[in-house]
Image: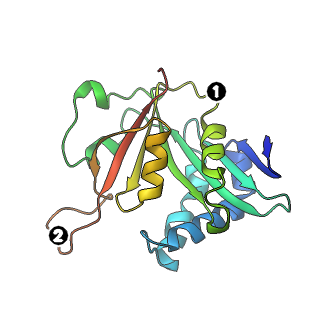
Amino acid sequence: MTQQAGMTTERMDGPAAVRVAEAFGLVYAEAFAEAPHHETEEEIAAAFGRFPEQTRRPAFRAALARTPEGEPAGMAFGWTLQPDAVWWDELTEPVSAAMRREDGRRTFGLIELAVRGAWRGQGVARRLHTALLEGLPAERVLLKVHQEAAAASAAYRAWGYRKIGEARPPGEEAGAGTEPYLRDVMLLDLRS
């Protein structure tokens, strides 16, 4: 656990994250109801309803930031991608076989990183990111970010990520009614 300016950031495994799932859910609900996501209560409930199952994924790890009063300020979580990971199949343009090769240890998928509005711009996201990745044995980190989330994209670039492609949300195909939003797929090489 790290502490900075009264804020604590704790990394945890799946069972520990499940015990404080309400805190993760509070951050998720507030952050993803806002632009550019505009998720409805039903979408938030459905998305975060998968959290207990997600905590059982291989090498799941999470980080939670709290104020000195114990209020959740931000969260991050992810897991290692398995050989059958579908992330690479969501890209709008294919990448090389060498790029998409997964062995269950090579790539950590950063699934969510969010900070509640009142604590943005104070380095909370960076501390969460650092805590989450500290000691990670993976070679690289892969994430997807909404293309209209300019602040998040800028932060990821500043932390060393590079865009390697674009992806559509799962289950949404181009030309099927309204055009779904695209997400930038970004990669951080941990070996450099």
Q: Could you tell me if residue 86 is visible in this image?
A: no
* Residue under numbered circle 2: 176
Image coordinates of residue 167 in percent, x first then y, are 28, 51
Which quadrant, please, contains the N terminus? top right
Contact between marks 2 and 1 (CB within 8 A): the answer is: no
- Is 136 placed left or right of 8 in the picture? left
Number of marks in picture = 2
Q: Is residue 148 above or below residue 95?
A: below
* Residue under numbered circle 1: 135
Image coordinates of residue 86 in percent, x first then y, are 33, 44
Residue in view at x 30 percent, y 28 percent: 99
Name the amino acid, label 2: Ala
| In the foreground, 90 or 50 | 90
Q: Determine which quarter of the picture holds residue 96.
A: top left
Q: How many other residues sit within 10 Å of disc 2, few (<14), some (14-19) or many (≥20)? A: few
Name the amino acid, label 1: Gly
Q: Secondary structure at mark 1?
A: loop
Residue in view at x 17 percent, y 69 percent: 176
Please identify the residue farthest to the top as the structure is shown.
Answer: 191
> Gap in Å between the C-alphas at discs 2 and 1?
42 Å
